[in-house]
Image (cartoon, rainbow, N blue to C red):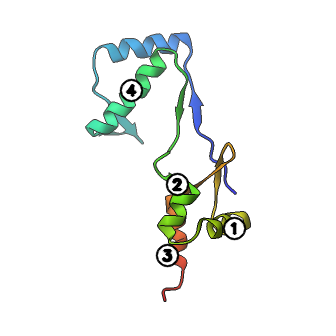
Amino acid sequence: MSQDAPKVTGLGPGERAALARTLAGSRDVTVFVDGTAHRLAPSARDAVVDLLERLSRGEAVTVASVAELLTTSQAAELAGISHTFLRNMTDRGDIPVQYRGSHRRIRRDDILAWLAAQPSG
């Protein structure tokens, strides 16, 4: 069973002020990875700028992947199996599961990998 908690972060007052000044002049965002500059696509840029603006206002920010997590019903439908069968597989550890409170969430990639490993027939 995997528990991949969302990442929560915030900034101190000095960092917030510096970030707010930087964002005040531009919405142009370039990301550096291993010294190589990457200009973000508009949708990614907007998401990063929104994150940075929230941090500059002193808000705590949570970052998590939600689109790839399925409910057990969604995962069972994708796999073409019953909800009960899927729950039993997660209980046995055949398919990794994450918990959000008491609710099970299953990564889409884990369901697809399980499906790919099944004998065709």
- Residue 86 in view of the camera: yes
Residue 13 at what x, y percent from top left? 54, 10
**Mark 4 vs 2: CB contact within 8 A:** no
Who's the residue at 52% across and 10% down the image?
14
Foreground tag (1 vs 4): 1
Residue 79 at what x, y percent from top left? 51, 69
Position of the N terminus by quadrant: bottom right
Marks 1 and 3, how far apart at CA: 19 Å
* Sequence-wise first label, 1 or 4: 4
Left/right of residue 55 with respect to residue 96 in the rendered view: left
Who's the residue at 58% across and 69% down the image?
82
- Residue 112 in view of the camera: no
Quadrant location of residue 19?
top left
Who's the residue at 40% across and 41% down the image?
33
Instruction: Please state which amino acid type lies under the numbered disc 2.
Output: Leu
**Mark 3 vs 4: CB contact within 8 A:** no
Foreground tag (3 vs 2): 2
In the rendered image, which residue does mark 2 sit on?
A: 70
**Classed neighbour count for the residue bearing mark 1: other residues with Cα under 10 Å, few (<14), some (14–19), many (≥20):** few
Residue 43 at what x, y percent from top left? 30, 38
Left/right of residue 106 with respect to residue 3 in the rendered view: left
Instruction: Please state which amino acid type lies under the numbered disc 4.
Output: Asp
Instruction: Please state which amino acid type lies under the numbered disc 3.
Output: Ala
In the rendered image, which residue does mark 3 sit on?
A: 116
In the rendered image, which residue does mark 1 sit on?
A: 88
Foreground tag (1 vs 3): 1
Instruction: Please state which amino acid type lies under the numbered disc 1.
Output: Asn
Residue 93 at what x, y percent from top left? 70, 66
SS of the residue under disc 1: helix
Foreground tag (4 vs 2): 2
